[in-house]
């Protein structure tokens, strides 16, 4: 039996990644993080997707009391879109929505879980093309973390799988549709409102992706 741990946020990318893993024959378990994000609406989408797929899930509640991100600190404004961004975006240009070391922390939980249950893989919907420029969404970051697994765990052979890393948002949407992922259930907006704001990086990337997908279809 192929087992995998899925980092599920409730967004387009993580939902498509879950369906990708299921399509590859993995028995999946999902980790959903409640880390004090102002866009808690995404948690509802993550749970709904997990229930729809009948994938067991756990919600891990953690705190970043030092904040350091506009996703955690409501006193900081969510920046409007800054297109275009590049995989080589300089650290000084990384937006305030970056949560310090978030993916490292999330992967550490996922790695512990995967090793404990004998999973062979950790799936994460990281993307290095249509994204906000975060340093922990780049291929070299995941290559480095793979070495951490090899050097610092008993299992050693757990693989980090990033199936979307080199895809545009439109290509992710195309893949999600092909796999039957319920993209209409997903949530992308960084704001904490009941409706998408339409102007943050995540909203703009989502809109751009669907626009290009629809034109190509």
Image: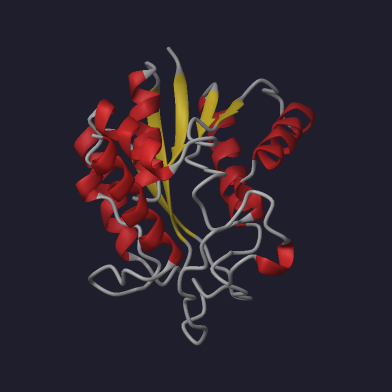
Report the side of 130 relative to 103 (left or right).
left
At horizontal 37% and vertical 16% (from top left) the residue drawn is 25
Residue 155 in view in this figure: yes
138 relative to 205, above or below: above
41 relative to 213, above or below: below
Residue 104 in view in this figure: no
**Horizontal and vertical percent position of residue 181:** 25, 35
Q: Nearer the viewer, residue 92 or 142?
A: 92
Quadrant containing the C terminus in the rendered view: top left
At horizontal 33% and vertical 20% (from top left) the residue drawn is 23
At horizontal 40% and vertical 25% (from top left) the residue drawn is 21
Furthest-front residue in this view: 215
Report the side of 211 relative to 24 (left or right).
left
**Horizontal and vertical percent position of residue 88:** 69, 51
Furthest-bottom residue in this view: 75
How is the rendered protein coloured?
A: secondary structure
Furthest-top residue in this view: 1
- Number of dots carrying numbers: 0
Q: Nearer the viewer, residue 175 or 162?
A: 175
**Horizontal and vertical percent position of residue 173:** 32, 39
At horizontal 54% and vertical 21% (from top left) the residue drawn is 120
Quadrant containing the N terminus in the rendered view: top left
| Residue 129, quarter of picture | top right
Q: Nearer the viewer, residue 109 or 41?
A: 41
97 relative to 47, above or below: below
Q: Nearer the viewer, residue 186 or 210?
A: 210
**Horizontal and vertical percent position of residue 95:** 59, 68
Report the side of 198 relative to 85 (left or right).
left
């Amino acid at each position: 039996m192929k087992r995998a741990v899925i980092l599920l946020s409730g967004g387009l990318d993580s939902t498509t990644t879950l369906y990708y893993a299921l399509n590859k024959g993995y028995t999946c378990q999902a980790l959903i993080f409640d880390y004090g994000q102002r866009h808690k609406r995404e948690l509802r989408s993550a749970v709904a997707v997990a229930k729809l797929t009948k994938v067991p899930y756990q919600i891990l509640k953690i705190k970043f009391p030092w904040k350091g991100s506009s996703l955690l600190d409501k006193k900081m404004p969510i920046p409007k879109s800054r297109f275009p961004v590049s995989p080589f975006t300089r650290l000084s240009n990384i937006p305030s929505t970056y949560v310090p070391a978030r993916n490292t922390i999330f992967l550490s939980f996922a790695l512990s879980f995967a090793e404990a249950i004998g999973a062979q893989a950790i799936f994460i919907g990281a993307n290095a093309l249509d994204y906000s420029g975060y340093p922990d969404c780049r291929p070299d970051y995941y290559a480095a973390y793979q070495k951490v697994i090899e050097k610092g765990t008993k299992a050693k052979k757990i693989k980090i799988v990033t199936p979307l890393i080199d895809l545009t948002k439109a290509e992710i949407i195309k893949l999600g549709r092909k796999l039957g992922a319920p993209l209409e259930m997903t949530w992308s907006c960084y704001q904490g409102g009941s409706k998408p704001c339409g102007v943050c990086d995540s909203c703009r990337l989502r809109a751009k992706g669907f626009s290009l997908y629809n034109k190509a279809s």
